[in-house]
Image (tube, rainbow, N blue to C red):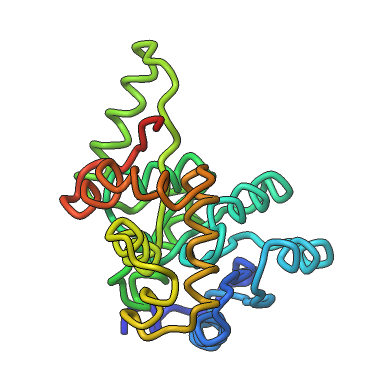
Amino acid sequence: MRHQKLLSLPNPPRLLIVADVRLYREGIQASLSNLPQFSVIGAVSNAADALELAANTPPDIVIVDMATRHSLTVVRNIRHRLPDAHIVGFGVDEVEGEVLACAEAGLAGYVPCDASLDELVARVESVHRGELLCTPRMAATLFRRLALREDGEGPQPQAVMLTAREREVLKLVDGGLSNKEIAVRLRIEVSTVKNHVHNLLDKLNVTSRMQAAARLGTHVSVRQRGLATNLNPV
């Protein structure tokens, strides 16, 4: 692989990994720790642990799993407390709404859901050089958003990013299924469904399942068509 040929740097960038799924964070930590161009200082499950670790050894780059619960809040907290660190998100769906939401939260770069380890390494290296790697379509989207702001466009509703599982749950909520029925359909525990529903209400800034389902037409179905996922007020 390309990155295996690189020589060790005299002062390799320090990496910190944040992912609430232990298998993911330990796997990424093990893979990146074997590369001479990086120095991995740790892998943690949440922003609080990341900030605690960073107090002793400040990271140059923080890699965040965007499937982590409240991932955008995690990114904002890290960005606020560690302004000198660059944040790279992985597992980002390359659709306009999600990329813009990530950029506005403070990401300096992102890795799509279907990216390989080589691509993760390339994105981290580019961010460390002060560059951004993205598709031409995403670059055009970012420039278009900047142009709209320069033209004095008013503030836009904040984009909301849902995980694949949360989108599944939201569709079933819209279909009128109970938590127990959703658990059976998705073959998961009822308590897990309750957690997903709680996260949906929080992310969509609503207080009931009915209100969450009402947003299906402007979020989930639009996102499946690969268009923007900004939500209009209910």
- Foreground residue, 34 or 82? 82
| Residue furthest left in the image | 225
Is 201 left, or right, of 164 in this rendering?
A: right
Give the image location of residue 18, x and y in percent: 60, 69
Give the image location of residue 215, x and y in percent: 34, 43
Q: Is residue 198 above or below residue 178?
A: above
Residue at image x 58%, y 84%?
22
| Residue furthest right in the image | 56
Give the image location of residue 226, x and y in percent: 19, 50
Residue at image x 23%, y 37%?
140
- Foreground residue, 184 or 30? 184
Q: Is residue 133 above or below residue 96?
A: below
Choose top left, top right, bottom left or bottom right for residue 180.
Answer: bottom left
Choose top left, top right, bottom left or bottom right for residue 188.
Answer: bottom left
Is 168 left, or right, of 28 in this rendering?
A: left
Residue at image x 54%, y 88%?
30
- Foreground residue, 36 or 174? 174
- Foreground residue, 129 or 44? 44
Q: Quadrant of the N terminus?
A: bottom left
Choose top left, top right, bottom left or bottom right for residue 41.
Answer: bottom right
Residue at image x 28%, y 41%?
218
